[in-house]
Image (cartoon, coloured by chain):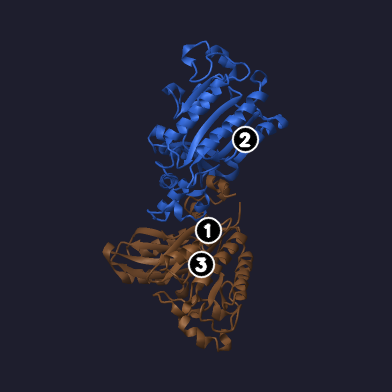
Chain colours: A brown, B blue
Amino acid sequence: MKKILLCELNMSEGTDVAAIEKVTAALRGTPGVTVMDVDSDKDHNRTVYTWIGEPEDVLAGAQNLTEKALEIIDMSRHHGSHPRMGAVDVVPFVPVRGVEKEEALEIARRYGAFLGSKGVPVYYYEEAATKPSRQNLVDLRKGQYEALEKKMKDEAWRPDEGPFAFVPRWGATVTGVRFPLVAYNVNLRTTDVEIAKAIAKRMRFSTGGLRFVRAIGLPLEEKGMVQVSMNLTNYEKTPIPVAYDLIRSLAATYGVTVAEAELVGPVPLAALEDVVRHCLQVHRFEASQIIETHLLG
Amino acid sequence: MKKILLCELNMSEGTDVAAIEKVTAALRGTPGVTVMDVDSDKDHNRTVYTWIGEPEDVLAGAQNLTEKALEIIDMSRHHGSHPRMGAVDVVPFVPVRGVEKEEALEIARRYGAFLGSKGVPVYYYEEAATKPSRQNLVDLRKGQYEALEKKMKDEAWRPDEGPFAFVPRWGATVTGVRFPLVAYNVNLRTTDVEIAKAIAKRMRFSTGGLRFVRAIGLPLEEKGMVQVSMNLTNYEKTPIPVAYDLIRSLAATYGVTVAEAELVGPVPLAALEDVVRHCLQVHRFEASQIIETHLLG
């Protein structure tokens, strides 16, 4: 089976349709690239591209797209409601199937070096971070584009690639490797949001829960329910059905049942294979048993 | 997403490696065909080919394979331990994804007409059967190849395609359409095979159970367990997790637990999507959320 790497590139242009189409064409014209989604948001003034393919093809797609994006965007004139600090703002590479972390890191670093060679300051984040203070996007992007000029005078903000200087036209780019994130929301048959908050607290890593779960409790007023909204940051080590079983048993301690749940956005097939293993007790289930996997090359 | 049809062709030659390779090459040389498995068994003197692709390509593969098989096989000299009555013995077409029953039936009928035009008597079975007595393979193949000469003198055995005559070299072929069969075995933590038999009886359609379940109870002496061995003949209408839940609750009435289970052989992705919907309560899960499905064209 072929390797699958995913790239999700966040570009700071979401309004100029003709310009966006030029960038999209550069991505689509890259051999071996399958574009999953192109999502432009006018209020955010931002477009999120998602594509998959073999690692080298995905890198080529990122480079082709980026060359066009750097031509059309001038950050000194950019306004939008979404936090951003660069023309090419954030570019995570995500291993989906058969790609080791090291291989994905090499792709991210080659992409970073490419951007640097074009004159764009680059910070590596998540699995590619060169120091702990650069792991989180939120920390890196603090103050956004507007703070970059000042930051670039501080040695702590020396970029990992590219010039140690404020580049008004392009700002700075954050790139790196992260694992696939599974967004799993579980709705409970109660209107008491305190129950959702208490369960979220027990579920999430930061307050004693499962190692790879982030969770918050929310009201869902229209539905007359509450929601435990979760991000599973490593579905191999904390599988979706493990989170489901725990949430259901925590809910039971409040006499509350699970009404429904949703998986939001894309999920790797491997995460679903674990659902089969866990929920049907088929411990030795293999991906090659799924007929469609034979068409993946 | 492209349509996927599967064909499983059972050929009465499993010993002559050079001859088998010629037949295999004819299948593999067909554009658009993905060969999943080629399984030759010397004792059976039989080879089972499994391939997938778009309906027209799958049909072309069947025709190319069949032409070669008819060249190399002489049934008047065939011996093997597996029941058989033709050089090309049984050819089910199985809709896997996006293929309606009518479309699969048309493919099976075109394949049957092709075989008939080559001079092979053909019987349609399962969903393609022209009368109830021809639905089951076991009924059609009763007496095997050796009974064909006599059968061909009886009007009841007039074939659906091809000559109404005994053809010593090729016997007769059974073809048609069946739904994907999911083989699901559940092992129970007891050595009492009567419990497995009682549960199988409650599970299977023929004795009051689920509409699309066939089941038997077996001892698994080496493991010190018993097994409820099931075939799910329509995973859309009787999903795997529904069978699992029922079997687990029936076992509980004997104070017995499920030790492990296995899915044997290929499974359509759609059957696994139902596992996600059922087991994680994600009722609105869509196949397009699975990243890999974007590579299926």
Q: Which mark is residue A9?
A: 3
Query: Which label sits in the foreground, 3 or 2?
Result: 3
Q: Residue sitting at 52 percent across and 22 percent down?
A: B122
Q: Position of residue B59 (x, y in %)?
A: 54, 33
Image: B5 above or below B136: below
Q: Tell me the element at label 2.
A: helix
Question: Taking B182 as reference, is B10 left or right?
Answer: right
Indicate the chain on which mark 3 is placed: A
Give coordinates of residue A281: x percent, y percent.
50, 51
Eye-nearest disc, 1 or 2: 1
* Image coords of residue B235 (percent x, y): 44, 42
Report in which chain the residue with disc 1 lies. A
Task: Give the left or right position of residue B204, taking residue B9 as reference.
Answer: left
As drawn, B121 above or below A155: above
Identify which residue, A138 or A197, lies in the foreground. A138
Report the amino acid beneath label 2: Leu
Marked residue chain, label 2: B
Q: Quadrant of residue A157?
A: bottom right
Residue named by callout 2: B27
User: Toward the viewer: A263 or A284?
Assistant: A263
Mark whose residue sits in front, 3 or 1: 1
Residue that numbered label 1 is attached to: A28
Circles 3 and 2, Cβ within 8 Å, touching? The answer is: no
On the question of residue B229 being in view, the answer is no
Mark 2 neighbour class, 10 Å CA radius: few under 14, some 14 to 19, many 20 or more: many
Tell me if residue B240 comes above or below residue A47 in the rendering: above
Q: How far from the left and from the top, in percent, is residue A151? A: 52, 86
Q: CA distance from mark 1 to mark 2?
A: 33 Å
- Pick whichever of labels 3 and 1 is earlier in the sequence: 3
Q: Label 1 amino acid?
A: Arg
Q: CA distance from mark 3 to mark 2?
A: 42 Å
